[in-house]
Amino acid sequence: MSDEAQVVDMRAWGQYVRDGRGHFDRVVRSFNTFGRNARELVMLLHSVETDPVKSLTLMTDSDGPLEGAEAFRTEFWAQVDQRLHNMVSAAIALVDHTRPLVKFYEQYESDFTREFAARSQAVAQSPRAVFLRRLRNYLVHCGVAPTMQTMRLGEVAAEDWDHLRIQLSAAGLLRWDGWNGPSREFIESHDGGPALREVTQAYFDDMRKLYEWLFQQYAVLHVPGVPPKHLQGAAEAS
């Protein structure tokens, strides 16, 4: 093959790299927003569920062992509502922001887009993901999620306390008729209702693994000094 036949359109190559970087940058920022919201919700719940004084204050309607108990309870539940709404909204937005990236590469990198689609579907079809998508619709129609607290009794050192669980009330959720079969089954599979910290953490872990893999692919799709395959083919055909 002659040297002339191997010439690559540098302008097209540069534009391809810029467009690809733009798509990845947007998705990275969107994922970081989702991750921040998920971690903030988990940390908020953890801060109360693993603190015996805060746990007991949340379980009672009296002043309890914590000074300013009523103000504490009001602020805590307001933050739960805010951070839960932010987390599920950011998760939906992240999925929407990822679609243009996949569409951009599908005509050039079909192996990559097929692999991502398979990995993404595995996460999206998990029972907790199906539930959280429907929960977003629930919050739009109903405003706030119904919650409840359960506490295990037993002697334990303060530093080992992890006896409180903040749950989404199954009875309250199921009053809404917008659940599909899988999301209803997920709710009913948890005694009293899904534990919010565990569900959020598990879903975040699933999404983190998926998007860590996605972000690693940039270096595979854009190897420095190596033109993309579709431009290599164009050069050979010229």
Image: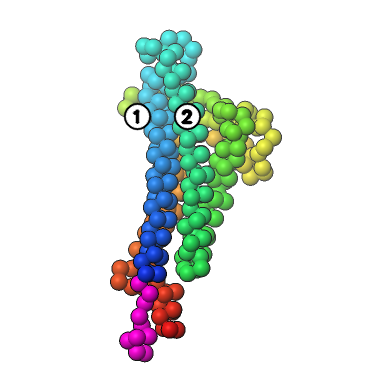
Mark 2 and mark 1 in contact (Cβ < 8 Å)? no
Q: Main secondary structure of the magenta part?
A: loop
Q: Residue at x 44, y 54 (%)?
A: 210
Residue sitting at x 33%, y 24%: 158
> Residue 108 placed where, x, y %?
47, 69
Rendering quarter of residue 237: bottom left
| Nearest to the observer: residue 158 or residue 24 | 24
**Numbered disc 2: secondary structure:** helix
**Circle 1 sits on which residue?**
160
Q: Judge the density around disc 2: few (<14), some (14-19), many (≥20) Cα neighbours within 10 Å.
A: some
State which tag comes first along the sequence, 1 or 2. Answer: 2
> Residue 222 at x, y = what percent?
36, 66
Q: Which element is circle 1 on?
A: helix
| For residue 216, above or below residue 179 | below
Residue extending furthest toward the top: 63
**Percent from the top left, x then y, of residue 39?**
40, 38
183 w.r.t. 139: above or below: below
The quadrant the N terminus occupies is bottom left
Residue 44 visible in the snapshot: yes
Disc 2: which residue: 82
Say if 139 sits above or below 9 in the image.
above
- What is the span of residues highlighted in magenta in the rendered image? 1-10
Give the residue type at disc 2.
Gln
Q: Residue at x 47, y 68 (%)?
A: 109
Q: Residue furthest bottom?
A: 1
- Whole-percent x, y for residue 113 in the image: 49, 63
Asked if the magenta segment contains residue 5, the reply would be yes
Q: CA distance from mark 1 to mark 2?
A: 28 Å
